[in-house]
Image (cartoon, grey):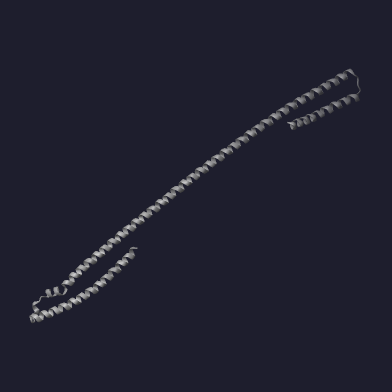
Amino acid sequence: MFKWKGKNMAKESSNSASSEKKADGNLIGNAEGNGLNFMGVQARESGGSGDAVGVDKIRDLLFGNQMQDYDRRFSKLEERVLQRFKDVESEAKRNLDMYETNAKKQVDSLAGQLRNEKDSRADADKEIDRNLREQNQALEKQVRALSDQLSALERDVADRINRNDHSLREEIKQKNEGVQMLIEKMFADLSNVKTDRNLLAGLFVEVAKCLNQDPVGSKSNSDRSWKAS
């Protein structure tokens, strides 16, 4: 924009200078013509007294008005150039202020966007942390519940084992007592009744069968009690 204005100023200055040169050339030509005519008239009136006219007077007569006009025109041109430079400077200052204002607005806008993005990310991080805490708490609750269930199951199994063991021991004790009573009865019968060897062998076979059947019966009873529980 400054280059364009400078080109326009240079163009206007060159145009004005060329027009002024043309006008000055015309004025000089007219002045020279008028001066020569005036000098001819003076020479004719004075009868050849041209030597009395000084060179300075001739110069003033020829170029005095033109020089004043030149000075006046140069002064006006200088004023226009100075005014043009002032206008360019003012325009440049306005453009610079406008650029600074726009740059400041853009920087403020970017800073605001960064702050908003930072706040949104902080909120998102807080939300993620909250969700993680909630999930961890829920998982801990589930683990505690499973641990409680496992502990209860272990206690239940231990209680069942203890009950089955106690019942099995009682059953074995009763069987042993029954076998012992049977043996004592057999020995009592043997002491009271005379028997042969075959009868004694049969009795021992019966005792052996009872002894062999007791553990099996106890085991089946314990299995049935375990399944029933």
Q: Nearer the viewer, residue 56 or 126?
A: 56
**Image coords of residue 185 (percent x, y):** 85, 20
Q: Nearer the viewer, residue 103 or 172?
A: 103
Q: Nearer the viewer, residue 205 or 18?
A: 18
Q: Which residue: 75% across, 25% down?
A: 170
Q: Which residue: 13% across, 79% down?
A: 39
Going by the image, does 149 lie left or right of 35? right
Q: Quadrant of residue 6?
A: bottom left
In the rendered picture of this protein, how many numbered marks are placed on residues? 0
**Image coords of residue 140 (percent x, y):** 58, 37
Going by the image, does 170 lie left or right of 39? right
82 w.r.t. 200: above or below: below
Going by the image, does 8 lie left or right of 177? left
**Image coords of residue 124 (percent x, y):** 50, 45
26 w.r.t. 145: above or below: below
Q: Which residue: 51% across, 43% down?
A: 127
Q: Which residue: 14% across, 74% down?
A: 61
Picture quarter with the C terminus: top right
Q: Quadrant of residue 53?
A: bottom left
Picture quarter with the N terminus: bottom left
**Image coords of residue 112 (percent x, y):** 42, 49
Q: Quadrant of residue 9?
A: bottom left
28 w.r.t. 228: above or below: below
Going by the image, does 206 lie left or right of 15? right
